[in-house]
Amino acid sequence: MSDTAPLILGIESSCDETGVALVQSHGGPVPRLLSHALYSQIEMHQAYGGVVPELASRDHIRRVLPLTSQVMQEAGKTLKDIDVVAYTRGPGLAGALLVGAGVACALGAALGKPVLGVHHLEGHLLSPFLSADPPEFPFVALLVSGGHTQLMRVDGVGRYEILGETIDDAAGEAFDKSAKLMGLGYPGGPALARLAEQGDGAAFKLPRPLLHSGNLDFSFAGLKTAVLTQAQKISAVRAEPVEAWPVNVLADLAASTQAAIVEVLVKKSLVALEQTGMKRLVVAGGVGANRLLRAQLNAQCQKLKVRVHYPELHLCTDNGAMIAMAAAMRLQAGCQQANRNYAFDVLPRWPLDAITV
Ligand code: KG4
Ligand code: ZN
């Protein structure tokens, strides 16, 4: 590896997005993104109402090498310039992870370069470092993805302490499942959020689970059930199924659902800031793209003189840039885990606080 400016190729394939990116550590505090490319499989899975793991794996196989050529070309680099090949080792769908890991290790072996398995959530967590205004350590992180909802104390790269997490569904899952029962398709989170903009968030009374629990854990499974019950009530009163509702009624239910999820996320984030005494909050993961969440966090944090950092909107959901960035930051922090043994494995379940630098 060249000492001055290691070039890292990052490959993400944990779920339904194939992402590839090139990041270079150039001696500054934050490595630089040179290029990234993404192929989303959402359209393919839409017909099934959710991700079909076998189809996801097969599609990653089709996309990963063409995307790799694309990022090399866009950055004006060749494969020989790569110093480290990073890939998502977990958590995620086993078959999908194996595609990225297999290709990364084959590339590493062919080039004689080390490979580094990266934790997908560490990628999300460090994705705000790809923005024009990166955070500084330490900070409180609210990690809100399709599969995870966690509040974390982050003291540096690889120094993650979970302060609280969901005991059942994740916030993204609450968005997606509620959207599905409203007939908004997959993944319903963004569609529900769009519809909610036209609705009244106070129209229907929905629970705020664990809001006053005194700890930093979340629970969203009951909320989804409450949305279902509310939808059934509305259908009974109107004597028509959800598909026949006028758009304003659907928008009101979407807005009420979003308001319940966002209120819990915001309140718990504020408690985490208070408990840790920190003045910096980082929001990451797909739900971090939610406009109401951003607006409410910005407003509350401004009052408390807390700075909030987000990934750029297009880097909130899964992408290769965050994996390359996490790898680059790990290497910069002295991580010794890049290796040449190419006998890879993947970790479909992998707690974030199990990793170190
Ligand atoms: O982080 P991510 O891409 O995937 C995982 O690692 O799980 O997050 C995807 C999740 C999905 O649940 C999706 O519905 C949600 O993020 N999401 C949103 C928005 N954009 C994406 N939820 C609410 N509002 C949005 N604007
Ligand atoms: Zn993700």
Image (tube, rainbow, N blue to C red):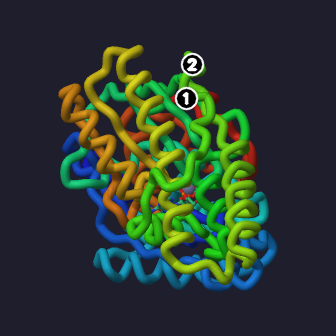
The mark found on residue 215 in the picture is 2
Q: Residue at x 47, y 49 (%)?
A: 259
Q: Residue furthest right?
A: 54
- Can the viewer see residue 59 in this picture? yes
Q: Nearer the viewer, residue 95 or 215?
A: 215
User: How far from the left and from the top, in percent, is residue 325?
Assistant: 39, 52
Q: Residue at x 67, y 75 (%)?
A: 183
Q: Nearer the viewer, residue 175 or 100?
A: 175
Q: Residue at x 65, y 60 (%)?
A: 178
User: Comparing marks 2 and 1, which lies closer to the viewer?
Assistant: 1
Q: In this image, 126 relative to 215: left or right?
A: left
Q: Nearer the viewer, residue 355 or 173?
A: 173
Q: Nearer the viewer, residue 255 or 116?
A: 255
Q: In this image, 232 relative to 85: left or right?
A: right
Give the Cα distance between marks 2 and 1.
9 Å
Instruction: Write down the quadrant of residue 322 in the picture.
Output: bottom left
The mark found on residue 211 in the picture is 1
Q: Amino acid at mark 1?
A: Leu
Classify 222 as above or below 316. above
Q: Amino acid at mark 2?
A: Asn
Classify 212 as above or below 218. above
- Can the viewer see residue 1 in this picture? no
Instruction: Write down the quadrant of residue 16 in the picture.
Output: bottom right
Residues at marks 2 and 1 touching, judged by CB atoms closer than 8 Å: no
Q: Residue at x 40, y 58 (%)?
A: 289
